[in-house]
Image: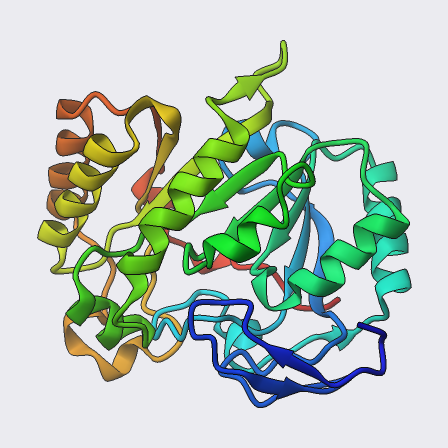
Amino acid sequence: MSDESVYICNLCPRKCGAERYKEDGAGICGAGTLPRVARIAPHYWEEPCISGEKGSGTVFFSGCTLSCVFCQNYEISAKRRGRTLTVYELSEKIRELESQGVHNINLVSPTPYAESILRCFELYRPKIPVVWNTGGYERVETLKRLEGLVDIYLPDLKYTDPELSMKYSGAADYFEYALPAIKEMARQTGKPVFDDNGIMQRGTVVRHLILPQHTKSSLNVLDCIASELGSSVLVSLMGQYLPLGRAAEYPEINRRITPREYNKVLDHLEELDLDGFAQELSSAKSKFVPDWDM
């Protein structure tokens, strides 16, 4: 696929067969054949083993295969704010980011641009770990093409309930694809590996964001991780929910989570003896949402 090609896309579980042109496309993600990027910079608010002291070298891509109504990155995921780069320009930006001393190259919402990223790594493969930071809605077939190129997978596991995933993310089949995808990620990376400073070099970290009034859903997700993935992954329990994006249209989630909701899910995480991280409720602040300034 050249930068000028028309591309028929089936990269994600939607398999929509959308025509994609240089700048944009007809799929739900709106992506074109060239990568569209909203921000490239060190980022200090990921999990401690990802951000460390030097930061995670994040590349925030515009567009998304999901349509989460509460997305904290709504400006770029739904509105596609950002700038189009050539594959060569992206490779040079990644090289520059690496030179700043970051711990890894963290590709955020990369799936619509998997073809461009594969071509980018033909031009330049970072000498530090590559992170695939995703909503979890992936095709195993696409992930298999990344084997050997991605060192760390950082997927969400948002829901097990198809009604919730349809209502809030526009994908009734979310769990049907997310669980096999995460199993494939864990197969590729193996159990987590860290350097002497506690910075992850390889492995899979499964994130889960607690939603207001949906603690039962969160408990089901944790049960699933315990039974299906166990010690092959780390768990990152996230309490940072803010009613952003279109959350105001859904009264039941148009607020932050309460300490009671958070502690209920945290207690279950500890009961299951799952290894990982628990984000403090104090992280639910808008200042942690990046500026989309490219």
Quarter-of-image position of residue 5:
bottom right
Decide if residue 240 is in sight here.
Answer: no
Q: Is residue 33 above or below residue 47?
A: below
- Give x and y (percent) for residue 197: 62, 13
Pick the front one: 123 or 207: 123
Could you say which quadrant of the image residue 270 lies in?
A: top left
Residue 16 lies, with reference to residue 252, above or below; the image says: below
In the displayed structure, does residue 117 sit left or right of residue 87? Answer: left
Where is residue 171 drawn, in percent x and y?
Answer: 31, 72
Does the image show residue 199? Answer: yes
Instruction: Give the residue drawn at x 78%, y 76%.
Output: 84
Q: Residue furthest top?
A: 196
Scheme by which the image is coloured:
rainbow
Q: Which residue occupies 62% across, 71% down?
A: 62
Task: Kindly indicate the quadrant of the structure image that contains residue 213.
Answer: bottom left
Which quadrant of the rendered structure holds the N terminus? bottom right
Residue 47 as seen in the image, left or right of residue 51: left
Percent of width and height locating residue 264? 11, 39
Disc tally is 0
Q: Residue at the spot x=25%, y=35% of the render?
A: 228
Residue 10 in the image, given as x and y percentages of width and height: 54, 73
The image shows residue 26, relative to residue 199, as above or below, that is below
The residue sitting at 30% across, 32% down in the picture is 229
In this view of the protein, which residue sits in the foreground, 71 or 23? 23
Q: Quadrant of the C terminus?
A: bottom right
